[in-house]
Image (spheres, helix red, strand yellow):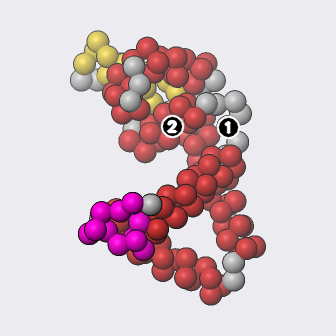
């Protein structure tokens, strides 16, 4: 592992370990949520709509870094399953806004709840109270990386 002189070996090691652990945890959490055949791209769009609210297909394509044609292919099954709906943009009648339907909102909420319950159960089963307190303290330190 080659590092620049101004970055300590310990900082490089910590960065590597964090990336590996968070990658594994992210994959595990993705597996927990019951997708019922949804692709990762479809799940990402549902999550984005839940977080950011209605958006045009072109705005979603830009946010997800895919071509507009690809976004159309992502949205079609979500529309067919009744998870998203399109309505005219009140500020520009030529555009349509994509938003979550009540079924889409329930789906996102259910997936989040399943992931949170899995994580809470795993923390309870695999760690002592003292270890969980240490994890909470470590998370507060890690939160500083995000500027929060």
| Residue matched to label 1 | 35
Judge whether residue 27 can be spotted in this image.
yes
The residue shown at (51%, 37%) is 44
Q: Residue furthest front?
A: 2
- Residue stretch rendered in magenta on the structure: 2-12
Judge whether residue 113 can be spotted in this image.
no
Res 119 quadrant in image: bottom right
Looking at the image, which is closer to me, 4 or 56? 4
- Residue 4 on the magenta span: yes
| Residue matched to label 2 | 44
The residue shown at (47%, 18%) is 70
Could you tell me residue 46's position as x and y percent? 51, 36
Mark 1 or 2 closer to N-term?
Answer: 1
Q: Residues within 10 Å of mark 2 (few under 14, many from 20)?
A: few
Res 135 quadrant in image: bottom right
Q: Residues within 10 Å of mark 1 (few under 14, many from 20)?
A: some
- Main SS of residues in magenta: loop
Quarter of the image for the N terminus: give it: bottom left
Looking at the image, which is closer to me, 90 or 3? 3
């Amino acid at each position: 592992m080659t590092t620049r002189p101004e970055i300590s070996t310990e900082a490089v090691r910590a960065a590597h370990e964090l990336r590996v652990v968070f990658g594994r945890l992210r994959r595990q959490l993705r597996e927990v949520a019951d997708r019922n055949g949804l692709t990762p791209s479809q799940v990402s769009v549902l999550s984005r709509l839940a977080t950011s609210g209605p958006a045009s297909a072109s705005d979603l394509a830009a946010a997800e870094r895919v071509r507009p044609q690809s976004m159309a292919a992502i949205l079609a099954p979500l529309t067919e399953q009744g998870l998203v709906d399109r309505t005219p943009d009140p500020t520009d009648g030529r555009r349509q806004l994509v938003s979550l339907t009540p079924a889409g909102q329930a789906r996102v909420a259910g997936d989040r709840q399943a992931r949170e319950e899995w994580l809470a159960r795993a923390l309870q089963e695999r760690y002592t109270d003292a270890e969980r307190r240490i994890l909470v303290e470590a998370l507060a330190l890690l939160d500083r990386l995000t500027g929060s």
